[in-house]
Image (tube, grey):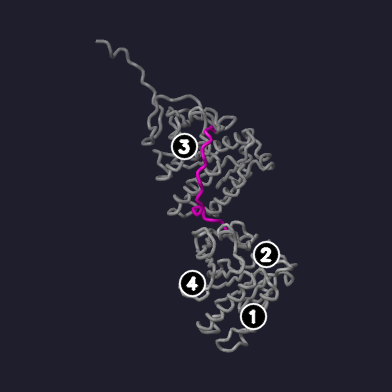
Amino acid sequence: MTRLSTGLADLDLILGGGLLAGSVVVLAGPPGSGKTILAQQICFANATVERKAVYYTTLSEPHSKLVEHLRGFAFFDPATLGREVEYVHLGDMLRGSGTDDLEPLIDEVVRRALEDEPVLVVIDSTKMLRDFVSDHALRMALYDLTSRVAHSGAVLLLLGEYTAEEMQTGVEFALADGIVHLSHQPREPVDRRTLRVVKMRGTNHLSGAHTVQITADGLQVYPRVESFLPEGAASKGRRVPSGIPGLDALMGGGIPHADATLVLGPSGVGKTIGCLNFVAEGLASGERCLYITFQDTVDQLVDMAGRFGWDFEAARASDHLVISHVPVGRLELDVLAAVIRHRLADGTTTRIVIDSLAEMARAAREADRFPAYLRSLLGIVRAAGASLWVTSETRTFGPMEEPLAGLMFLFHNVVQIRYIEHCAQIGRVLNVLKMRNSGHDNGVHTCHVADRGVALGSKLTQVTGVLGWSVLRECPIPATDDTSAVS
C-alpha cells in the first residue's frame, strides 16, 4: 500500500508508516492544539508542481492572515504558494448555497481532486459545515465527498474543533479511515500538548498520548516510549571500564556490557565528575557518547572536563560526544526519550549518561507514569547494546533515604558515594551496593576527587551507618587499657 509521509519521521512511525493514499483522516482537537499547523506542514512536505496540495478553508481566518502566521516556520516556502500549495476559500460558496445544499461545494472539491490529482486535500474546518445543513444532509454530503475523492488517490484531511462527545457520534468519524486527536493541557510551568491516534485502518499504529511541541520548525511529535517493545540485547560477556580508578576492581573487572548503572549520592559528592570519568573513558577508546544534563549547561560541562584534562570540545566537534542540556522547566519525558532513541539509531553510540534521575522524575510531573516510562527507556538502551550511567541525588544531611523507592530493581548495578565523618573532617566513601548476576566487593572504600576525576583509595574496616540508618562515621578501635587487666 502506498503511504504518504507527513514529513515528520516520528509521526510516520506513530501512524504505522504514514498516511495511506486515498484515505480520509480527521484531525480533531481544541483551539491551539496545532491542527492547522500540522495540516499545512504536511502540505508543504508533500506538494510538488505535478501533484499539488489544495487547502480549502470554509469560514476560518482570511488566507492573507493564514499565510502571514506561517512565515515564522522553517517549513514555509512562499515560492511554492499557488504553484504547489494552493489555498481556496469556500466561504462565498457556503453563503450562497440553499438550505441543506452542500452539493456545489462537494462538486468543486471533487472536480479539483479528479482533474488536478492533488497529493493532499485539506478542508479546514469541516465542523463549520454543520452550521449550514442538517445532520442528514451533512452525512450524505460527506459520504459523497469521501467516496469520490478516494478515487483520486489523494489523502483527504478533515479538520475540526470537535468535542469528545462529537467524536463519538459525528458522521465524520464514522466515515474516516483515521482519527488523530490533538490536545492542549494547561500545566505549570509549561503547558503540554499531545497527539493520540484514535483510529487508523490498515496500520499498526503506536498507541498512547505522544508529546507534541510547536517550535520554529513547526509541529514536532515525540513518540511515547512505552509504545515500543524492544527486545533485550544479548550480553556479550565482556566488561565495560568505568573510567574511575579503583572502581572496576570492586565490580569484578568493570561494568557488564549493556548494563544500567545507578550512582547515588548527595549534592557535591562527585556524581557529575564520575559521569565525566565514564564518558572520558569511552572517548579515549574511540566510542561515541551521549550526555544528558538538566542543570549544568554544555559550556559548564566542557569547562569542568577541561579542568581534569579531557577535551570534550574536540569530541563534540568530531561527533563522538553529544551533550544535550534540557532545562528542568522544559523537561518532557518523551522528548528526552527521543533524543536517546535517535542517537542510538545507527548502533554506534555505546555510552549514555543521564544526570540526574531524581531531578528528572520530579520535573516531569508524571509520577504515575514514571515507573513504566523508566522501564521502557532502560529497555531501549539495553536493546541497542549501550551502557547507561545514571545519577540520582540523596539527602545531604542525616540518614540516607532511597530516592527511587520501588524502582531501583530496574538497574543492574547500584553504586553509592557518601559523605563520612572522620574526626573533625568530612570525607567521601564509595561502595557497590548491588550488581545483578555478577560478583562484587561489599566493602566501603575511601573516595576523593583527584587530578583525573573521582578515584578510590583504601578499604575501611571500622565504619558505622553503612546501611544508611544513621550518619556514616569512621569508628576507630579504642586503645587497650593494660592496667584494667591487673588483679
Using the rendered view, name the quadrant where residue 404 is placed: top left
Q: Marks 4 and 3: CB-CB under 8 Å?
A: no
Q: Secondary structure at mark 1?
A: loop
Q: Nearer the viewer, residue 41 or 453?
A: 41
Main SS, magenta residues: loop
Q: Secondary structure at mark 2?
A: helix
How much space separates mark 4 and mark 1, taking CA atoms?
24 Å
Q: Marks 4 and 1: CB-CB under 8 Å?
A: no
Q: Which residue is mark 1?
A: 90
Determine crowd level at label 1: few under 14, some 14-19, many 20+ residues with C-alpha closer than 10 A.
some
Question: Residue at left 51%, top 34%?
Answer: 256
Of the residues shown, which amino acid type is indicated by label 3? Asn
Q: Which residue is mark 3?
A: 413
How much space separates mark 1 and mark 2, taking CA atoms?
23 Å
Residue 274 position within the rendered picture, expressed as x and y whole percent measured from the top left: 54, 36
Residue 167 numbered tag: 4
Of the residues shown, which amino acid type is indicated by label 4? Met
Residue placed farthest to the bottom in the image?
98
Residue 46 numbered tag: 2
Question: Residue at left 62%, top 88%?
Answer: 96
Magenta segment: 221-239
Camera-side mark, 4 or 3: 4
Of the residues shown, which amino acid type is indicated by label 1? Leu
Indicate whether residue 224 is drawn in magenta.
yes
